[in-house]
Image: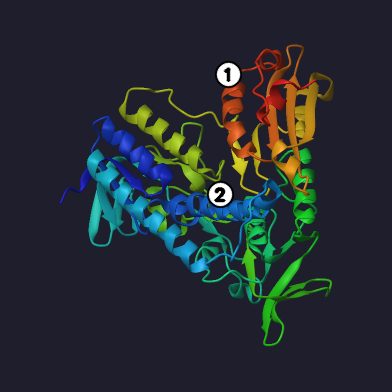
Amino acid sequence: MQKQFNYLVIGGGSGGIASARRAAEHGASVALIESGAIGGTCVNVGCVPKKIMWNTAHLATQIEDAKYYGFVLENKGLDWKILQQRRDAHIQRLHKIYDHMLVDSGVHFFAGRGQFCGPHRVQLDTVVLEAEHILIATGGKPLLPALPGAELGLTSDGFFAMRTLPQRVAIIGSGYIAVELAGVLNHLGSDVSLLLRKQQILRTFDQTLRDVLTDSMREDGIHIHNLFQTTALYRDTNKGLTVEQNNGENKQGFDQVIWAIGRKPNTAHLALTKCGLSTDTHGFIVTDEYQNTAVKGIYAVGDVTGRAALTPVAIAAGRQLAERLFNQQPEARINYNCIPTVVFSHPPIGTVGLTESQAIERYGEAQIHTYQSRFVNLYYAMTPQKPVTVVKLITVGEEETVVGCHLIGEACDEIIQGFAVAINMGARKQDLDQTIAIHPTAGEELVTLR
């Protein structure tokens, strides 16, 4: 068994696999260690199954809308068991694809939990693997609070293991995962309560997006309770699960409670002190812009770093690191300053660049000019529901360079990708103005803003 490699990757998620394969393409001898299901969070309990669930909820809405277009349909409801079986079968297919990709790339795969036993040595059961370069890409996992009865609630991981659709569910949290799960369950027929510790959802997003999504969720029937300080969970035989808060105004009668209060890095099992590495107070591994840690020859990418916890970011960072280490590109790195992202809420959000408040803070209010359009997508011309779509551009300086683009509404999850390219290339407002609109679409609103 080979035990010495040029490159050793701990973690078989998106970032780790991408980096391992790219390094192998450049001739490096590569080993990859993974203790769980191949593909990490994204494939197993993140992006992929989440998007399938979002598609399911979206279809449920479209089935209801179809009658307004003249279709006579009989909706006999969702068979959760069939959905779960087909979703999980797709994930199993992805596992096989990843297995084949690693073999085809020449990456040596080791199943098990690795931990450091020296600066360039990792122990896996009774085997010790050595490498000049070691990448930590172990990702993260959902947080459970240290509150009485917390174990009675599910995390986002547990959501994907649910065997039935809950009738009444409380979701505790305000970020991506909280609003996404709230929207999915609501559109599939659950009575959903969203419990926020602070005042607003999606606190790092542009205020316009937050306001529009909050209004839309309430119009869809989601009960949003802000400033809700959860102190405990408990189960009552007759009343189901109760969420207790500090002022005594408890919420009760839930079939399920889902915690969506953040994620923590998978670093506790790595024995980092044995390689001379430490973490920050939250357990994250600190890196520079080149993914270097404080120890030479040890790197980190993805959620374990606490920076832009998005699958495409981990993939890009992992690949650029491999280019730098094994393809003579000493300056290879990703740009963390302009990362597009989507929230698969109902309606979806697409965003890239600075929010309006961030732009004002960076450049001063006098330098900032914003453009915004609010309209009802043509899709809803035939339905009684009239949800709004909002598109917003933020520009800076006399040339009006676009530094932020924020969208919410039907198809905005797809629209944002192309505009992210333009913004990364330094597009100005006049560049968008000179682009011919495609009519009738939602995307045309971004090139016709006045």
- The amino acid type, in three-letter code, at marker 1 is Met
Hey, which residue is sitting farthest bottom in the picture?
A: 237
Instruction: Kindly identify the residue that appears in the image at 41 percent across and 49 percent down.
Output: 13
Residue toward you, 397 or 136:
397
Hey, which residue is sitting farthest left in the picture?
A: 1
CB contact under 8 Å: marks 2 and 1: no
Q: Which mark is residue 280?
A: 2
Q: Quadrant of the C terminus?
A: top right
Instruction: Kindly identify the residue that appears in the image at 75 percent across and 56 percent down.
Output: 220
Instruction: Kindly identify the residue that appears in the image at 66 percent across and 29 percent down.
Output: 443
> Residue 112 appears in which quarter of the rendering?
bottom left
* Label located before the other in sequence (2 or 1): 2
Report if residue 175 is visible in the image. no
| Disc 1, SS | loop
User: Residue 330 at what x, y percent from top left?
Assistant: 39, 23
> Residue 251 appears in which quarter of the rendering?
bottom right
Q: Is residue 3 left or right of residue 54?
A: left
User: Residue 421 at what x, y percent from top left?
Assistant: 56, 24
Q: Which mark is residue 133?
A: none
- The amino acid type, in three-letter code, at marker 2 is Asp
Residue located beneath label 1 in the image? 425
Report if residue 361 is visible in the image. yes
Q: Nearer the viewer, mark 2 or mark 1?
A: 1
* 116 versus 405 height, above or below: below
User: Residue 82 at what x, y percent from top left?
Assistant: 47, 65
The image shows a total of numbered marks equal to 2
* 198 versus 207 height, above or below: below
| Disc 2, SS | loop
Mark 1 closeness class: few <14, some 14–19, many ≥20 residues within 10 Å: few
Mark 2 closeness class: few <14, some 14–19, many ≥20 residues within 10 Å: few
User: Residue 78 at what x, y percent from top left?
Assistant: 56, 64
